[in-house]
Image: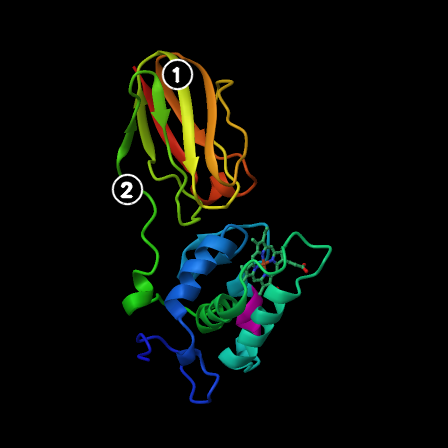
Amino acid sequence: MAILGIAGCTNDSTSVSDSNLVNGKKLFVGKCGACHVMARAGTKGVTGPNLDEAFSSARQENWGDDGIRGVVYGQILYPNKNAPMPANLVTGKDATDVAAYVSTVAGKPGEDLGLLATAVAPAGSGKTAVEKNGLLSIAADPNGQLLYVESKATATAGPIKLEMPNESGVPHNILIENTPIETPVIENGVAKASGTLKPGKFVYFCSVPGHREAGMVGKLTVR
Ligand code: HEC
């Protein structure tokens, strides 16, 4: 299998070339990134340790990709029971792929190239969410990135139903600052809230810790 122009290819039989790094990156962003910063994956979660920091010293001590891969794989299977990281978020070959991807990029400068660069669709369509017939729908990024698909929204003043579709499996909600309009936190489905909007400029964001800071925030204009 072709290696995608990224560093970290080794020649032994269990090398990362056997693993599907693209699958590993997608799964990392969807299952791990909400809790871990890792620059190459573009993830910004703060519940767990920053994985670039966690592994840069291991790299300096010459652990190499294979050593790091083993640590990550072990962590996926056997996380500390008292910590908030659930065991077996990914299993089987998926777990191998995630460990291979992390070991290839954590603590390394630069950017993902080739197929890895496009493995995860960029979050945010750049589109504006427009309220229609009293319904305003702003989706959470379906790939698990800490962003809304729409970072801008417009609405007319008056009663409003706010909806946040969330297919990501990552817990999110949406609330409009300085109003009582706030949905519950959900991991899958459509979170809903309603209320009345006055004209003005508002900020909406996700109140799960760390998510607003990571970019899960947008601007609502009410006319
Ligand atoms: C709900 C949040 C959460 C999710 C999701 C999560 N982690 Fe973690 N992770 C943590 C926390 C918290 C720790 C610190 C655990 C401890 O202190 O024992 C951690 C620790 C780690 C470590 C050890 C870092 C170190 O400093 O040694 C690695 C590696 C890791 N996680 C990888 C992953 C991978 C890969 C995934 C996805 C399959 C993942 N995590 C998903 C919260 C999470």
- Can residue 22 be seen in the rendering of this structure? yes
Q: Main secondary structure of the magenta part?
A: helix
Q: Residue 111 falls in which quadrant of the image?
A: bottom left
The numbered mark, 2 or 1, whose residue comes first in the sequence reads 2
Rendered-image quadrant of the N terminus: bottom left
47 in relation to 12, above or below: above
Range of magenta residues: 54-58
Residue 16 spot, x, y in % from top left: 44, 78
The answer to whether 59 is drawn above or below residue 116 in the figure is: below
Direction from residue 142 to residue 51 in the image, left or right: right
Reading the image, the residue beneath label 1 is 160
Disc 1 marks a residue whose amino acid type is Ile
Helix, strand or loop under label 2: loop
Q: Which one is in front, 167 or 85?
A: 167
The residue that label 2 is drawn on is 125
Q: Is residue 69 above or below residue 128?
A: below
SS label for mark 1: strand
Residue lying farthest to the bottom in this orientation: 12
Residue 32 placement (x, y as % from top left): 51, 56
Disc 2 under 8 Å from ligand 1? The reply is no
Whole-angstrom CA distance, mark 2 to mark 1, is 23 Å
